[in-house]
Image (spheres, grey):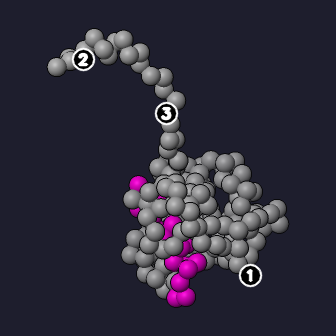
Amino acid sequence: MTLFTAETSLRQLCPARDLSPAERLLVRSIRTMVFTDNGGKAVARAFRRKLGDAAAHQALAALFSFVGLLSGNARRNLRFRLPQCRKVSADERTLVALLAALQAGRMSHARSLIGWLLPPGTQEPAFAYAASLARGFREGGLMFNGPSVRRIPKRSTETATPLADTRKSLVVL
């Protein structure tokens, strides 16, 4: 039994066009594996094209193992968008943040994300798979940018400038 479900919310969490090449490769690869029958071959082609043969081999083995571990052992149903969707779900952003933390050497942050995704018995193998996947991306020349997947607040926390100052510069016709 898989713990993956389709995210169908219409809320714009993060546009996929704002993702870096590494983030886009990860998100689209997982989506392809989850929602298509023959996704493994398409993912392997994409990894070889973007990372090269040596890095792709390491990264693919780690990705397949990591996704397999997530699909059967996640703490809750993980939500993924359909493969060609132009939005990114919160769970997809979490996976990107996990690999960004691993590439940046923020191990405590990565462990907390693994702990949020998986129960205690499966955290260590998942951490090893994720670390191997992040290493494969780095060896292939693709780096994750952590801040690009942050949610942009709808309202600014800045205070408004007083209207009196702007009224002086207005010209009424």
Along the line of sight, the residue nearer the viewer: 60 or 118: 118
Mark 2, Cα crowd under 10 Å, few <14 / some 14-19 / many 20+, is few
- Region of the chain picked out in magenta, as a range: 18-38
Q: CA distance from mark 1 to mark 2?
A: 65 Å
Q: Residue furthest bottom?
A: 38
Q: Quadrant of residue 128?
A: bottom right
The residue closer to the viewer here, 17 or 21, is 17
**Where does the image place residue 30, in percent across and percent down from the top left?**
55, 72
Which element type, helix, strand or loop, lies under badge 2? loop
Query: Which residue bears the numbered disc 2?
Result: 170
The residue singled out by tag 3 in the image is 156
Q: Residue at x 48, y 22 (%)?
A: 159
Which disc is residue 1 wearing? Answer: 1
Q: Residue at x 34, y 12 (%)?
A: 165
Q: Is residue 40 visible?
A: no
How many residues crowd mark 1 within 10 Å: few (<14), some (14–19), many (20+)? Answer: few
Residue type, label 1: Met
Image location of residue 39, percent across then percent down = 52, 83
Q: Please tell me whether the stretch drawn in magenta is mainly helix, strand or loop.
A: helix
Residue most toward the right?
A: 121
Q: Amino acid at mark 2?
A: Leu
Whether tag 1 and tag 2 are in contact, CB under 8 A, the answer is: no
Callout 1: SS: loop
Q: Is residue 35 magenta?
A: yes
Is 121 placed left or right of 47 in the picture? right
Q: CA distance from mark 3 to mark 1?
A: 43 Å
Q: Is residue 140 left or right of residue 172?
A: right
- Residue 160 vs residue 106, the one in the foreground: 160
Q: Tell me residue 153's x, y (percent).
A: 52, 41
